[in-house]
Image (tube, grey):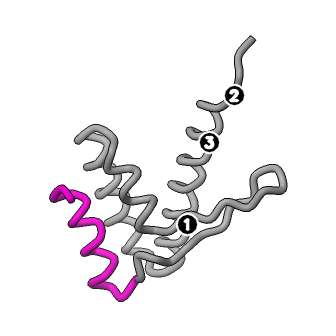
Amino acid sequence: MNEIEHSCKELLTSNDINLNSEIDFDVNGEVHTLSFGYIIETFMMASNASQLAFLAALQKAMQYNDEGIEKFFEGMGQLLLMTHLSKNIETP
């Protein structure tokens, strides 16, 4: 675990937010469930600049309490799913 990933996870756990909290996404009738921990770990595979942007956005979301955190992870989860789905689209 790198330092930025550790900071993200520590930010949540120090505010009593469970890394195993999950968000369900309905994609064409199929439910995909992503945990906060999974979303963090996946974004930590990106470039260092992207990791720092993720951490900064998470810190900003923390200022808006539970609603801000939930909306942050909903948005990040949607981005992950859209990226995954776009990679699976067959081009003619």
Crowdedness near tag 3: few (<14), some (14–19) or many (≥20) residues, C-alpha within 10 Å? few
Q: Residue at x 32, y 42 (%)?
A: 50
Quarter location, residue 40 = bottom left
Looking at the image, which residue sits at the far right?
A: 29
Q: Which mark is residue 86?
A: none
Secondary structure under the numbered disc 3 in the rendered image: helix
Q: Which mark is residue 82?
A: 3
Crowdedness near tag 1: few (<14), some (14–19) or many (≥20) residues, C-alpha within 10 Å? few
Pointer 1 residue: 71
Q: Amino acid at mark 1?
A: Lys
Q: Which residues are the magenta region?
A: 1-17
Q: Sequence-wise, which precedes: disc 3 or disc 2? A: 3
Secondary structure under the numbered disc 2 in the rendered image: loop
Secondary structure under the numbered disc 1 in the rendered image: helix
Q: Sequence-wise, which precedes: disc 1 or disc 2? A: 1
Q: Amino acid at mark 2?
A: Ile
Whole-Å distance between the Cαs marked 1 and 2? 27 Å
Whole-Å distance between the Cαs marked 1 and 3? 16 Å
Crowdedness near tag 2: few (<14), some (14–19) or many (≥20) residues, C-alpha within 10 Å? few
**Does residue 39 lie above or below 81 as drawn?**
below
Q: Quadrant of the C terminus?
A: top right
